[in-house]
Image: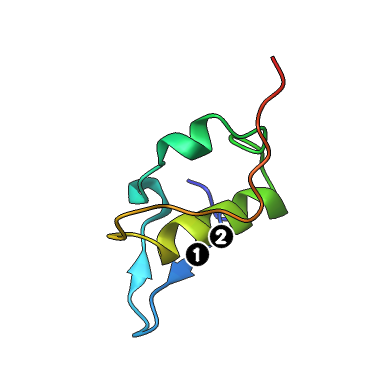
Amino acid sequence: MENNKPKYFNDDGTEINSDLIPNPSLCITCKKDGQSGEEEILCNLTRADQQGEEEFRCEAYEQKEE
């Protein structure tokens, strides 16, 4: 059980299960993907906010170095 896992809520107060927030293809190519702590929280909030949008945008995106 992860008691330290952050919780997220919609504007109406409904809790969002962070495990069910889709991970767009842009995120997979970002060097911040998979990081924990503050970066994980910011990424989850960005993805949760844009659920159902046609195009995903992220101002914090940084491409992984190969």
Residue shown at 43% from the left, 66% from the top: 49
Q: Is residue 52 above or below residue 13?
A: above
Q: For residue 32, what is the image quadrant?
A: top right
Task: Give the SS element for disc 2.
Answer: loop
- Horizontal side of 16 relative to 40 (left or right) equals left
Amino acid type at mark 1: Lys
Q: Is residue 56 above or below residue 64?
A: below
Q: Which residue is mark 2?
A: 6
Q: Does residue 4 appear in the picture of this structure? A: no
The outermost residue toward the front is: 55
Amino acid type at mark 2: Pro
Q: Does residue 44 appear in the picture of this structure? A: yes
- Horizontal side of 43 relative to 14 (left or right) equals right
How is colour applied across the structure in the image?
rainbow
Neighbour tally class for label 2: few under 14, some 14-19, many 20 plus, Cα within 10 Å: few
Task: Give the SS element for disc 1.
Answer: loop
Tell me where residue 37 appears, x and y as whole percent. 70, 49
Number of the label disc, if any, that sits on residue 7? 1
Mark 2 vs mark 1, CA separation in Å: 4 Å
Q: Quadrant of the C terminus?
A: top right
Tell me where residue 35 appears, x and y as whole percent. 66, 38
- Horizontal side of 66 relative to 51 (left or right) equals right
Residue shown at 47% from the left, 46% from the top: 1
Q: Are marks 2 and 1 in contact (CB under 8 Å)?
A: yes
- Horizontal side of 9 relative to 51 (left or right) equals right
